[in-house]
Image (tube, rainbow, N blue to C red):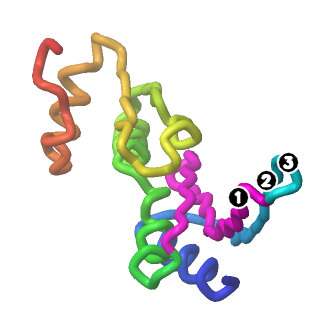
Amino acid sequence: MIDRAKRAVEAALAAGASDAEAYASQEGGREVRVHGGEVESLTAATRRGIGVRAWIGGRVGYAFGTDLSEAGVAATGPGTVSVAAAVVALLDGAGIQSLVLDQNMSVLEGSLGILPRRVLVAEDHELKARRLLKDAGLGHELRPDGS
């Protein structure tokens, strides 16, 4: 597990993080249900995973994955360096203040990445921000004008 955590950190750094850390966890449990002196059910479960926290542009991202295959571990690290972090770094570099919404939703979604992070800018900076993101090749991430 330690080697896999190291690989996840290396993947986050390779994806553009300035620093990263990882932790590996493994837990297990057993449950026996007895009714009237008879065993009704026996359940055993093991949960293993790797969590990665990465810093990019003064921001922090976090991902947790339970797929410990080479591909799963390789995807967990870069998952922390999200599109939202890249967008915020671009906006910060241009002097445009922004607010990231939904960045902690991974707690609710189980770190599946299915809930998009939203980045808001002040209305008077919208056109400049849109132009900046389009020029950076991130135009496909923008909502249509006026929505």
Q: Residue furthest right?
A: 37
Q: Which residue is mark 3?
A: 36
Q: CA distance from mark 1 to mark 3?
A: 13 Å
Q: Secondary structure at mark 2?
A: strand
Which numbered circle lies on residue 33?
Answer: 2
Q: Nearer the viewer, mark 1 or mark 3?
A: 3
At label 3, which amino acid type do we have?
Answer: Gly
Quarter of the image containing the C terminus?
A: top left
Q: Are marks 1 and 2 in contact (CB under 8 Å)?
A: yes
Circle 3 SS class: loop
Q: Going 57% across and 56% down the picture, which residue do you hit?
A: 55
Tell me the magenta residue range: 39-67
Dominant secondary structure (helix, strand or loop) of the stretch shown in magenta? strand
Q: Which mark is residue 41?
A: 1
Crowd around label 3: few <14 · some 14–19 · many ≥20 (10 Å): few
44 inside magenta stretch: yes
Magenta highlight on residue 90 = no
- The residue that appears at 51% across and 35% down in the rendered structure is 105
Q: Residue at x 79, y 53 (%)?
A: 33
In front of the other: 45 or 60 = 45
Query: Which quadrant holds the N terminus?
Result: bottom right
Name which residue type carries label 1: Ser
User: Is 104 placed left or right of 84 in the picture?
Assistant: right
- 88 above or below 46? above
Q: Which mark is residue 52?
A: none
